[in-house]
Image (cartoon, rainbow, N blue to C red):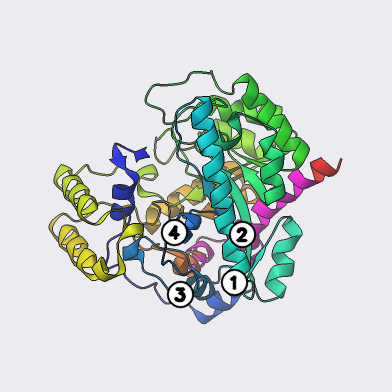
Amino acid sequence: MFKFGLPLAVLLASAAPVCAQTPPQVKPATKILHENLIVLDTHFDTPANQAVGGFDIRKRNNVADGSQVDYPRMVEGGVDGGFFAIFTPQGPNTKAGNDAARDQAIMRGVVIHEMVAKNSDVFALATTAEDAQAISKAGKRFVYISMENGQPVAGDLSLMQTFYDMGVRMMSPVHFANNDLADSATDPKGPIHGGLSASGKQFVTEANRLGILLDASHASDQVLDQMLDLSKAPIILSHSGVRAIYNHPRNVSDDLLRKLAAKGGVVQINAFSNYMKDITDNPARKAALVELTKTYGSPRDVAPEKREAYRKARQAIDAQYPPTRADMDDLMRHILHAAEVAGKDHIGISGDFDGGGGIAGFEDITYFPALTERLIAAGFSKEDLAKFWGGNALRVLKQADELKAK
């Protein structure tokens, strides 16, 4: 899978310097407030790490190894849970391609279920909005399941029921490239359907019938516009930015942001440098990261006995070619603009952690309390924070479920 011309392995390698700093200390009052909120992230790519042999989610792992989410850091960051993504890279839009995506998605779903089953003392599967509070009260972390990219069901929409039965409660139709359901915001070939295809429109209807929350992150403007018109339930953008702050097709325009809010939807602001500000291209750094990946593979795949050598090689690259990254000021600009345009009832957060996200000053989930402190300084009340950190996302999840009941 490619992003911005780079293999995903190289993108993960460049996501954060190996010598990332520890989170800043926050005021005791901030820590207490944060700990008393239901805090969730709507897009964890952590199952991709969980699928790698040797990864232990009970262990405190390292950003340098491509890991930003695990149980110890959830506790440290006051993170109660989130949506763990079944991500399938877009393959050929053929029967064979759709079948391969289906099979990969089923296996990734099994990985998530195994993670919960093997660690049932600290994790529990969540399928309704009410589960978040109940699981948190029981002293565990909740695990919702989402599907990023609809190709696994594109060849047969009846599979949406199969994945619903597996526990999937949020689905997006498309990822970086167009598929049989919808146009992507970033396919270099441009749109092929003019938004949703005929089966893409059926995808929306079926999601409403099942009670699946529709996610329009990665979709083109036309797709989002059409989904907002067609869906009887609110829509979420599980990890997106705002275009008025940085003009990128992955980000949402003010007009569509207003329409999203008017329909009751939510945008979860993304912490992914390339979608937040202009990033200076550094061909020498890019070439060095490509060679690093050729030598060691993806950060997720580096053999334990080679990890120290890998870290030193990464540190040398970072020292010679310092990365350009977005920072907390950039993240706050996106959040505050979304709050102004859509309102505080319609915003939330996703770091896109374990999927290339993470910015300077917001490296992994242990930095969440620092964001709470920034939001308090910006005038967010306790009620605003409760909505931002989970209330808004859980509301639209509940509304999708209530539509099914009707």
Residue linked to disc 3 = 59
Query: Where 223 sits versus 271, above or below?
Result: above
Q: Earlier in the sequence, mark 3 or mark 1?
A: 3
Query: Where 394 sits versus 340, above or below?
Result: below
Residue linked to disc 2 = 113
Residue linked to disc 1 = 119
Mark 4 crowd level (few <14, some 14–19, many ≥20, 10 Å Cα): many
Residue at the right extreme?
A: 406
Quadrant for the C terminus, please. top right
Q: Is residue 206 left or right of residue 115?
A: right
Q: Earlier in the sequence, mark 2 or mark 1?
A: 2
Disc 2 marks a residue whose amino acid type is His
Residue linked to disc 4 = 49
Disc 4 marks a residue whose amino acid type is Asn
Disc 3, disc 4: CB below 8 Å?
no
Mark 3 crowd level (few <14, some 14–19, many ≥20, 10 Å Cα): few
Q: Position of residue 265 (x, y in %)?
A: 65, 42
Q: Marks 3/1: CA distance?
A: 12 Å
Residue segment shown in magenta: 372-401
Q: Earlier in the sequence, mark 2 or mark 4?
A: 4
Q: Position of residue 94 (x, y in %)?
A: 50, 24
Report the front residue among 349 and 334: 349
